[in-house]
Amino acid sequence: MSPSNSRNFWIGVVSKEHVDIGVAGGFTQVNHGKAGPLERMRAGDGFAFYSPRTAYPDGELLQAFTAIGRIRNGTVYQVTVDDSFRPFRLDVDYFSSQPAPVRPLIDALSFIRSKAHWGAAFRFGVVRVPEPDFALIAAAMGRSFAEDFASPAKSPQLST
């Protein structure tokens, strides 16, 4: 879709309860800890969480974008949660933001092709979205896309 040196924008689909854990730890983990989706992400890419529910699998409906940030270094790593769960993660620098309900944005988001069956856009757990869609989501979350995601040539060097 775009050259390897340009920035991409991603949405991970995760319950709000799990988003809070990731934000507190400064990481993302998607698709039940699979590495594949994370390996497509690069340092500087935009990343947001969409939370269909407050908790997985049966929490209350939420249907909102719940966190937004920038991929820190693009290095995928594995952690041991317990003997049977060793998920892959990727570090993210999250920004302070407010949740943004998806319903008011559906008509304007181009990656949602079927406005009647909009939930299908999130069914695979991770979706790459066009920059204008991500900018709209960022604004709805109270962020300045121009400041947070300035073009890589113009953005200040991130401290490590």
Image (cartoon, rainbow, N blue to C red):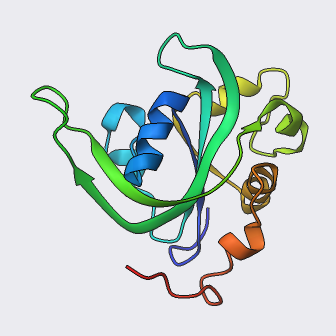
**Of all residues shown, which one is farthest toward the left?**
83
Quadrant hosting residue 65 = top right
Q: Which of 116 and 78 is in front in this view?
A: 78
Q: Determine whether, in the image, residue 140 is placed left or right of residue 131.
A: right
State the quadrant of the N terminus: bottom right
- Name the spot of residue 3 as percent of width and height, x first: 56, 73
Front residue of this view, candidates 22 and 108: 22
Q: In which quarter of the image is the C terminus?
A: bottom left
Q: Is residue 124 above or below residue 126?
A: above
Residue at the limit of the structure toward the top, as seen here: 58
For this view, does 152 lie left or right of residue 87?
A: right
Left or right: 49 as drawn, with respect to 117: left
Instruction: Determine if residue 155 is in view.
Output: yes
Q: Where is residue 119 in the image (x, y as percent from the top left)?
A: 70, 25
Rendered residue at 47%/19% (across/down): 56
How many numbered marks does the figure carry? 0
Which residue sits at x=52%, y=71%? 44
Q: Where is residue 129 in the image (x, y as percent from the top left)?
A: 67, 51
Is residue 43 shown above or below 12?
below
- Residue 112 vs 160, above or below: the answer is above
What's the residue at 65%, 89% (across, down)?
154
Q: Where is residue 58 in the image (x, y as percent from the top left)?
A: 52, 10
User: Between residues 158 and 40, which one lies in front from this camera angle?
Assistant: 158
Residue 47 appears in the figure: no
Residue that appears at 68% across and 78% down: 150
